[in-house]
Image: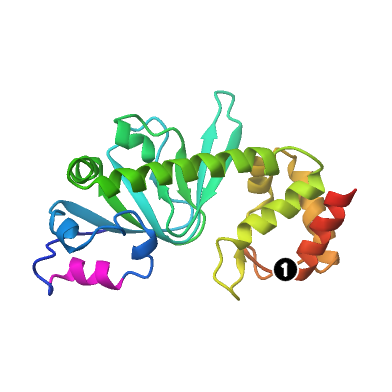
Amino acid sequence: MTVIPIYRKDSTHPQAQICQACAVRQFAFFGALDDNGLERIHQHIADQRIEPGQSIFSAQEAGQAVFTVRSGVVRLERVSERGDRRILRLAGRTDLIGLESVLSQRYAADAVACTPVEVCRIPRTLVDELSAAEPQVVLDLMKRWQRALDDAEEWLAELTTGPARRRMLRLLLKLSEYAQPGDMVWLPMRDEMGAMLDMTVETASRMVSALRREGVLEPMGTREAHLDMTRLMQALRAQDST
């Protein structure tokens, strides 16, 4: 983990150079800040790289920071008292996670890296400070909160109800949103698919095998796949018309 304070007034400062060159800055939290706003940032922002399977934060942990996802895919999940795991949603490039911390609440879910992930850890105290001085930060925060709510509602409506085949097709379409054009998508393990789609591992495996035979997806190793988007959309339209 690299921790470097930002001093915008020093244009040679390494963190200032990183932020200026960041490919997602204009879409990320604080992206709306002008030079005067950036000069207010004097607390430590950590640039973290998280390996697959590692935790970014855990449910019920005291929320001390929000995290901007710079690259990779993160899953937000909960484990019931019986030990049942449910993946609530995914987060990807430019998403802001850990929003509960802004209200001094505990994190509501485990955030786990699905792929190699890069995040910027933004302390809650910095968010509070900038929100008091920069109205656009408050507006941006509200928009991101609404976006997270919309994602959660879409996940619930599209990926946990209806025929198993449709749920799987919708999941593949969702995964394509987290890949760069032309890149392969991250392919969850079958048990992860079950935890996402509220289906058994056996059903998830059967659905993947069928779509593979149809040419919708082609696994490339154990955790990546190539999607034929034309066939995927055709399969979705056919499913929705039945």
| Corner quadrant of residue 237 | bottom right
Say whether residue 156 is visible. Answer: yes
Q: Magenta stretch mostly in which secondary structure?
A: helix
The residue to which callout 1 is attached is: 229
User: x, y percentage for residue 163?
Assistant: 82, 42
> Foreground residue, 201 or 149?
149
In which quadrant is the N terminus drawn?
A: bottom left
* Residue 62 visible, this angle: no
| Circle count | 1
Image coordinates of residue 158 in percent, x first then y, are 69, 43
Residue 74 located within the stretch drawn in magenta: no
User: Is residue 97 placed above or below 173 in the rendered structure?
Assistant: above
Residue 19 image-quadrant placement? bottom left
Residue extending furthest toward the right: 242
Residue in the picture at 59% in, 38% down: 153
Image side of residue 147 versus residue 118, left or right: right
The structure residue drawn at horizontal position 50% and vertical position 60%, both measured from the top left corner, is 115
Is 18 included in the stretch rendered in magenta? yes
Task: State the SS at label 1.
Answer: helix
Amino acid under label 1? Answer: Met
Specify start and end residues of the magenta stretch as a single range. Answer: 13-21
Relative placement, left or right, of 208 versus 187 is: right
Nearer to us in this view, 85 or 28: 28
Is 239 positioned to the left or the right of 189 in the image? right
The image position of residue 148, as x and y in percent, is: 48, 43
Residue in the picture at 30% in, 58% down:
32
Relative side of 33 to 239, left or right: left
